[in-house]
Image (cartoon, rainbow, N blue to C red):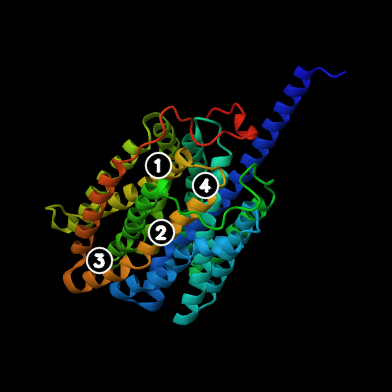
């Protein structure tokens, strides 16, 4: 007759080994995706400017097709409900690779560029709730934000590698946009391979609900509205100030990402621990206040009595990049208020859709404001939105005595301090 204590200890040890295996695989996938993002996100705006010479207004309008898959992510996820979260991750990463390869060979065909940009965007946006769901499943109780910070730090380290590829490829080796895009696509393929090796997630796999819209998640939805508006300041207009106003090359954008990512290796884990310690409300309110200052820097640095105002914009861009990490506070807030475990992935997807309902439409307005009234007014509007975000974040509440989300799964019982 076997000893129950020995059997339980053996099961616990096996669970810990399995979770460590899953975490290592996911970290490798995150690193591969970090290389991809480090290359593509630092070059895309310069690619548009150098190849197609588009205006700020045209750049704003281009966000509609680029962000449309993000708006439709809930629908796409619903249609793919028969896939496990990990299989959806594989499909999403491969979609990113296909889109980037297509962009590498588009040439000057604007319509073809839009087509492959949309394919890339579909893969990218489908992947967002997938990575959030997997990261939460790999976090021990009471340390979910800290674990997400650790995973984010790995991604930041990999982004440095990707951005370094851009600097070397464009400034020294001269492989051009095609060469850098192909390397980025290879990173997405590698990520798909690692995600494919993950085992099904406990309780978060199987037949997920196709759509979740509940009143209890209303504040989470509202926070995603403001997130969509804030995101465009960084992805479109923040970098467009550097590219169009201060005429910075792609290699300089890559260098700024290297600086931000190097800082992020330390910042992400610290932020995760801080979220666990002080809560999501304080972090998201502080984030909104910082965004107000950043917007004023973007819009009015040129009026300061200094020799090189571009350095102020550099600083704004780096800080802007860093505070994107506060998105993990929205995920952990949702995890704490989730009514059912299976709501999490579907609600994260709904959050992405709501985010993009704003981000696919706002840039067109911002582009017109830029062209007709001047770019500082874009950032005045963005600062006003950040103030509204701060007010909304002040209403965050979590159930009293709550322990980081629904009842932990067996794998989450592993003793794995960050």
State the residue position of label 4.
344
Q: Earlier in the sequence, mark 3 or mark 2?
A: 3
* Viewer-side residue, 72 vs 155: 72
Q: Tag 1, which secondary structure?
A: helix
* Separation (CA) of disc 2 from disc 4: 15 Å
Q: Which mark is residue 263?
A: 1
- Quick check: 314 above or below 243? above
Q: Earlier in the sequence, mark 3 or mark 4?
A: 3
Q: Quadrant of residue 11?
A: top right
State the residue position of label 2.
354
Task: Give the side of residue 11 with respect to residue 299, left or right.
Answer: right
**Residue 252 place in picture, x, y as percent:** 36, 58
* Separation (CA) of disc 2 from disc 1: 30 Å
Q: Earlier in the sequence, mark 1 or mark 3?
A: 3
Q: Residues within 10 Å of mark 4 (few under 14, many from 20)?
A: many
* Separation (CA) of disc 3 from disc 4: 42 Å
Q: Tag 3, which secondary structure?
A: helix
Task: Give the side of residue 329 with respect to residue 346, left or right.
Answer: left
Q: Residues within 10 Å of mark 1 (few under 14, many from 20)?
A: some
Q: Tag 2, which secondary structure?
A: helix
- Quick check: 199 above or below 113? above
Answer yes or no: is residue 337 visible. yes
* Separation (CA) of disc 4 from disc 1: 30 Å
Q: Residues within 10 Å of mark 2 (few under 14, many from 20)?
A: many
Q: Residue furthest right?
A: 1
Q: Earlier in the sequence, mark 4 or mark 1?
A: 1
Q: Residues within 10 Å of mark 3 (few under 14, many from 20)?
A: few
**Residue 312 place in picture, x, y as percent:** 23, 51
* Viewer-side residue, 105 vs 214: 214
Task: Give the side of residue 222 with respect to residue 115, left or right.
Answer: left
State the residue position of label 3.
245
């Amino acid at each position: 007759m076997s000893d129950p204590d020995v059997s339980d200890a053996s099961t616990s040890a096996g669970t810990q080994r399995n979770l460590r295996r899953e975490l290592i695989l996911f970290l490798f996938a995150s690193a591969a995706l970090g290389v991809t993002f480090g290359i593509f996100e630092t070059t895309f705006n310069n690619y548009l400017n150098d190849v197609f010479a588009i205006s700020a207004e045209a750049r704003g309008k281009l966000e509609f097709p680029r962000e449309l898959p993000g708006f439709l992510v809930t629908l796409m996820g619903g249609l793919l409900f028969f896939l496990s979260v990990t299989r959806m991750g594989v499909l999403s990463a491969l979609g990113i690779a296909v889109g980037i390869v297509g962009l590498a060979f588009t040439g000057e065909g604007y319509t073809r560029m839009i087509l492959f940009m949309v394919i890339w965007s579909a893969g990218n946006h489908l992947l967002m709730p997938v990575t959030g769901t997997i990261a939460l499943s790999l976090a021990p109780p009471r340390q979910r934000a800290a674990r997400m910070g650790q995973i984010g730090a790995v991604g930041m380290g990999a982004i440095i590698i990707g951005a370094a590829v851009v600097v070397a490829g464009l400034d020294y080796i001269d492989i051009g946009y095609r060469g850098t895009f192909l390397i980025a696509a290879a990173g997405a393929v590698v990520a798909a391979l690692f995600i494919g090796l993950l085992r099904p997630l406990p309780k978060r796999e199987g037949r997920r609900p196709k759509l979740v819209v509940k009143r209890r998640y209303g504040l989470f939805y509202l926070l995603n509205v403001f997130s969509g508006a804030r995101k465009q300041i960084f992805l479109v207009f923040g970098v467009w100030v550097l590219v169009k106003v201060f005429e910075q090359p792609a290699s300089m954008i890559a260098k700024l990402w290297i600086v931000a990512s190097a800082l992020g290796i330390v910042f992400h884990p610290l932020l995760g621990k801080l979220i666990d310690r002080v809560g999501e409300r304080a972090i998201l309110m502080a984030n909104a206040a910082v965004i107000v200052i950043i917007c004023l820097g973007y819009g009015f640095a040129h009026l300061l009595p200094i020799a090189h105002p571009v350095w102020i914009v550099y600083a704004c861009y780096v800080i802007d990049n860093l505070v994107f990490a506060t998105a993990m506070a929205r995920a952990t807030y949702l995890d704490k208020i989730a009514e059912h475990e299976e709501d999490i992935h579907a609600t994260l997807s709904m959050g992405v859709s709501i985010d993009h309902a704003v981000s696919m439409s706002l840039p067109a307005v911002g582009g017109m404001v830029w062209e007709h009234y001047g770019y500082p007014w874009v950032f005045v509007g963005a600062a006003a939105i950040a103030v509204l975000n701060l007010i909304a974040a002040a209403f965050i509440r979590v159930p009293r005595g709550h322990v980081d989300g629904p009842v932990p799964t067996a794998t989450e019982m592993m003793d794995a301090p960050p």
